[in-house]
Amino acid sequence: MTDKVNYRRLGDIAVIRIANPPVNALGQAVRAGLQDCMDRAEADDGVRAVLLVGDGRTFIAGADIREFGKPPAEPHLPDLCNRIEASPLLVVASMHGVSLGGGLEVALSAHYRVAQPSARVGLPEVHLGLIPGAGGTQRLPRVVGSGAAVDMITSGRHVGAAEALALGVVDEIREGDPEEEGLVATRALLDKGMERRPVSGLPSPAPLDWDAVYAATLKKGRGQISPAAAVRAIQASTELPFAEGLAEERRIFRELMETDQRQGMIHSFFSERAVSNLPDLRGVEPRAVGHVGVVGGGTMGAGIATAVLLAGLNVVLLEMTPEAADKARNRIAGNLAGALRRGKISQDRYDTLLSDALQTTTEYADLSQADLVIEAVFEDMAVKRDVFSELDRICRPGAVLATNTSYLDINEIAAATSRPADVIGLHFFSPAHIMKLLEVVVAEHTAPDVTATGFALGKALGKISVRAGVCDGFIGNRLLNACRTAADHMVLDGASPWAIDKALTEFGFAMGPFAVSDLAGLDIAWATRKRLAPHRDPRERVGRYPDRLCEAGHFGQKTGRGFYLYEDGMRAGTPNSDVTGFIEAERAELGIVPRDFSPDQIVARYLLAMVNEGAKLLEEGIARRPLDVDVVLVAGYGFPRYRGGPMKWADMTGLSDVLSDIRKLAEGDAWFWKPAPLLEDLVREGRSFEALNG
Ligand code: 3HC
Ligand code: NAI
């Protein structure tokens, strides 16, 4: 026995309590403790049943992810599950909080499952690049059938108690203290003379058209392999005896454990949690935020207001005219209607949010009581400075003044106020009520409790918040600019925009850079290019062909024509052949003979540009850790989560290879491909980006 698992006898029931905070992960000590306690219960005279319960907030959140990649230590979880199931005693699991992965697998090895109404269960291993590896792919289908098992395991979704009951994953829902309710249920089963009911003894589930399910799952995974691999394991449950199915599951699990995808996804899992864990904010109390002001109700302002309303806070939204304010209200109503359709809010909540929680106005005075104001007006320094000096005049002392600017200098915006310590960047992503990422941009004079308030708001809004410093584009847009420049150079040198988009979506990006530009509006980048033009170094190579498109009035999706042509209302476009003319004209003007780029070369150049720029951001302190860069790219820019992010990709590729590829490219364009000194240092010292993650 260990101190992580406790044994207590209550009459003829042995209570085995797992106490491994924070989430009762099944590390080696817990597995050993469970095994010892099962031995002890079986040797304990007069014990007829075992009740498994979790201490603290949850039953069991799964295997201990920190152990993955290290040599496995006995007892192994699949053996433990078999051992629990094979016990001559009646085993009952009482589940509260979450029972995920190995946690649900332990519960499925029990003979009866009781759950709290708020409990959630699931097999989320695919999100870690794995499949359930302790019998989940064999036992769950025997309980819920093949179709439901495919749905649960390939999506990894959390299933609420009511649905779990309907599916048969749990046998009973009881509200109250998990141990007391578990004891009541166990006692009733003993009184009824309930027999042990091992799931492995249930008949094999009915087969599906497995090749079709596999192909559909593979396609949906967009390059991620674990969901499709899970289908093959579930297939085994319908075709093989239990023990052989288990062996097949184990084989696939071990194979996936060795993949880069497993490394990438687990890196993402821990990084997403580490981003908001900032040493300099420990012990810093955020300011209280109940009332939020939003200035500007366009695409972003309306999205931000929607996110804030959905988090249960009140919003006052300021627009320039009553008509614009009405338009903003309609946009927000449209966003909330989407949440209603998706079942995120009830009709009642929808009505109250619009009637009580949202106020639109054209008067700055209405923002005087706001605890935090987020500005989302046009991307124009003069306009932003005017807004901030008004806010400075009207807002109460201590109110946080935030800007959603994409690129502008927040220090300069802060200087328009008499209180720069209260000014911060809160950079949302479009659509702001859906996208998970929030860059919390800390300016020169931003007070620590203002930064803490940014993170607290992000948490309340359900966002993944990443700290960034002030520079042109912060973390995400600066990296995007770098790799977009690399893409533009490839276009000038011979690749087509569509080939580049295709190579990158095949790599796993949600969209290619040219399709993204069409979505964002080509005019935005055009304005940025014009703004930066006077400060450009003459050695900088800038493609002009996107300007030609803009000059012709083609701004992407909003005008139906950009790099792609969009039929009425269509989101996916077909290549716009006009673009080829602009590109060829520019090549001719510059005397460039086009060359071929393979998809691998396209992906490599794009990522090398990202990594090099990421290293520069780290040097400048704009990003604190490589993992911050990774999370921004994955959560906000469609970088495939299963690859962990650009810095993780670089580590897995090998930094010395990365550097030597960059040096080779620098032979052709020394300005753009100048290696980041940090990258050179790391290679010289034989270290990786991971070493900087702390
Ligand atoms: N192993 C190790 N640590 C874990 C863990 C796990 N399975 N699950 C959570 N943690 C850690 C987190 O890293 C975090 O640590 P930190 O405080 O040092 O940052 C801490 O527990 C609390 O986690 P969260 O901040 O995420 O807390 P939440 O309350 O928001 O969420 C949760 C709790 C829903 C349990 C969420 O953490 C989660 O989804 N965890 C992963 C669950 C999972 O994937 N389980 C399957 C594991 S693989 C497996 O079981 C293989 C088997 O089939 C063989
Ligand atoms: P938008 O043009 O859709 O909306 C701007 C709104 O601000 C308009 O409704 C306008 O009437 C209003 N406005 C302008 N001046 C005002 C003032 N003085 N007082 C009150 N309202 C005023 O622009 P969008 O796309 O919403 O962008 C807003 C800000 O968010 C910009 O700084 C932009 O860079 C940034 N941003 C945009 C993203 C995007 O994907 N569109 C993503 C992240 C940030």
Image: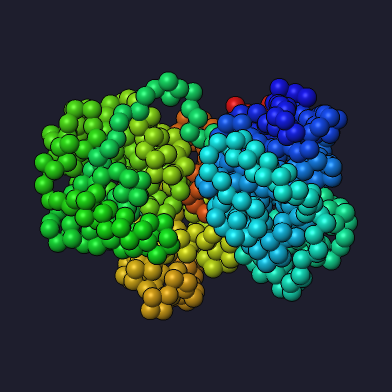
Residue depicted at x 71% and y 22%: 3
Front residue of this view, candidates 470 and 432: 432
Q: For residue 600, which quarter of the picture?
A: bottom right
Q: Nearer the viewer, residue 32 or 523?
A: 32
Name which quarter of the figure residue 99 lies in: top right
The structure's colour scheme is rainbow
Picture residue at 61% right of the left edge, 35% below the top: 179
Decide: is 41 above or below 512: above
Residue placed farthest to the bottom in the image?
567
Residue plotted at (32% across, 34% down): 424
**Count of numbered badges drawn on the protein:** 0
298 displayed left or right of 125: left
Q: Position of residue 672 (x, y in %)?
A: 52, 45
- Residue 440 is left or right of residue 131, and the answer is left
Question: Residue 607: x, y in percent?
Answer: 59, 49
- Tell me the quarter of the image containing the C terminus: top right
Name the foreground residue: 244 vs 625.
244
Q: Is residue 199 visible?
A: yes
Tell me, yes or no, if residue 272 can be seen here.
Answer: no
> Relative to residue 629, is residue 378 depicted above or below?
below
In the rendering, at what x and y percent does residue 305 appear? 29, 50
Residue closest to the eye, 687 or 166: 166
- What residue lies at 48% left-to-right and 33% top-to-bottom? 276
Image quadrant holding the N terminus, namely: top right
Whole-percent x, y for residue 218 in the image:
68, 64
Left or right: residue 254 versus residue 511 is: right
Q: Is residue 617 above or below residue 565?
A: above
Q: Is residue 292 above or below residue 620?
A: below
